[in-house]
């Protein structure tokens, strides 16, 4: 069952209780738990219900799989915060990771909390409303790109955060564009998605993994967008959001056999991404229409999220074959990133995109 230290410890505890047998009689475990009910802060009725749920096949015996689920269950915790953290984490982990993840959360007391996604969302919201309120013209809040352009001495100038191809030498713009959004609907969609997916990921994998993943996705998104369409300006944190989604997808891939609802998870992400990417390929290449969405940034973020998800996210239960996959992802992403950087340096902002540019001008 992998080399997770908490699972190995649980197996030792199981063997102590089971002795020479491969199962523990439910009555014996019930008696032991009732003796500790004051420590567990559970009533006898709660303990019986708890064990009843653990005995999945109703044979009055607890095997190791059932024992593992018993120890990993959020119902075993009396602390409400621990329960909440466990339930959130369960949404992004496989069944065979639960004991490791729950023990990991207990060991570190759920600290640090998921501050990166929270702070990123707060800053993105604050910057949008700061620029919108500061604009005397007060354009339509639903579609206005607040902060993209500003009046300086009566002249309309490019804002300091916007990524615009002709200013690619100002390298901070490859990162700061994430703080601008083309209207409140654009902002709300990104914030909701990154919180729904990002909070559980950060609870399990911590800020020092999710932070670099998100940041590199934003940068990679801008680089790929410039490589494929150097005429297009860029706003929004969609590259980072896509990275969070595909990082979760990487976890599904690594734990396919044990991941609950794996086909549902894969289907939802697949439909979402296929519609987004497929629709733009059709409109750009076959129809020649131009839209206001920088899909290449989404793709760059998605590639980054998947590769980082394989390589740096904390995998509680490790298997030998994963090392080969990690090496492939490391080499592949390094080549991908270096190629984008070189292409960005040598390509002119006036170069044509890979599709027919006749009907597509700059988005901003």
Image (cartoon, rainbow, N blue to C red):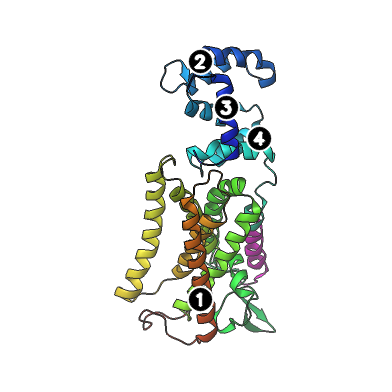
Please tell me which of labels 4 and 1 falls first in the chain: 4
Label pair 4/2, CB-CB below 8 angstroms: no
Disc 2 or disc 3, which is closer to the eye? 2
Disc 3 or disc 4, which is closer to the eye? 3
Q: Residue 252 colored magenta?
A: no
Measured from the top left, where is residue 326 in percent x and y?
Answer: 50, 58
Tell me which secondary structure the magenta stretch mostly adopts: helix
Q: Which residue is mark 2?
A: 26
Q: Which residue is mark 4?
A: 81
Q: Disc 4 versus disc 1: distance between alpha carbons?
A: 43 Å
Q: Residue at x 59, y 26 (%)?
A: 13
- Mark 4: secondary structure: helix
Please tell me which of labels 2 and 3 falls first in the chain: 2
Regarding residue 233, the answer to whether it shows in the image is no
Please tell me which of labels 3 and 4 falls first in the chain: 3
Q: Residue 130 colored magenta?
A: yes
Tell me the number on the disc at residue 75: 3
């Amino acid at each position: 069952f992998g080399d997770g230290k908490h699972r190995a410890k649980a197996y030792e505890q199981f063997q102590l209780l089971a002795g020479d047998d491969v199962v523990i009689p439910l009555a014996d475990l019930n008696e032991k738990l009732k003796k500790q009910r004051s420590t567990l802060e559970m009533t006898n009725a709660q303990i019986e219900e708890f064990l009843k749920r653990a005995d999945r096949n109703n044979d009055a015996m607890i095997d190791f799989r059932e024992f593992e689920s018993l120890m990993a269950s959020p119902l075993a915790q009396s602390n409400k915060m621990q329960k909440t953290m466990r339930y959130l984490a369960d949404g992004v982990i496989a069944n065979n990771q639960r004991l490791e993840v729950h023990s990991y959360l207990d060991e570190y007391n759920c600290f640090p909390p998921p501050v990166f996604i929270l702070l990123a969302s707060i800053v993105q919201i604050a910057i949008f409303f700061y620029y919108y309120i500061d604009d005397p013209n007060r354009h339509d809040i639903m579609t206005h790109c607040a902060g993209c352009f500003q009046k300086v001495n009566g002249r309309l100038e490019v804002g300091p955060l916007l990524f615009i191809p002709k200013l690619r030498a100002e390298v901070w713009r490859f990162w700061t564009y994430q703080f601008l959004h083309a209207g409140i609907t654009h902002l709300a969609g990104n914030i909701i998605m990154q919180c729904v997916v990002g909070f559980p990921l950060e609870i399990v994998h911590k800020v020092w993994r999710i932070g670099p993943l998100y940041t590199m996705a934003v940068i990679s998104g801008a680089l790929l967008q410039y490589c494929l369409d150097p005429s297009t300006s860029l706003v929004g944190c969609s590259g980072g959001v896509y990275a969070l989604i595909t990082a979760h997808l990487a976890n599904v891939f690594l734990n396919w056999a044990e991941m609950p609802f794996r086909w549902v998870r894969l289907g939802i992400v697949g439909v979402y991404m296929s519609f987004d990417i497929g629709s733009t390929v059709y409109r750009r290449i076959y129809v020649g229409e131009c839209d206001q969405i920088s899909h290449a940034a989404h793709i760059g973020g998605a590639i980054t999220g998947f590769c980082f998800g394989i390589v740096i996210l904390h995998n509680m239960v490790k298997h030998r074959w994963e090392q080969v996959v990690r090496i492939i992802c490391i080499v592949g992403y390094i080549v991908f990133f270096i190629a984008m950087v070189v292409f960005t340096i040598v390509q002119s902002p006036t170069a044509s995109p890979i599709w027919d540019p006749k009907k597509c001008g700059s988005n901003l």
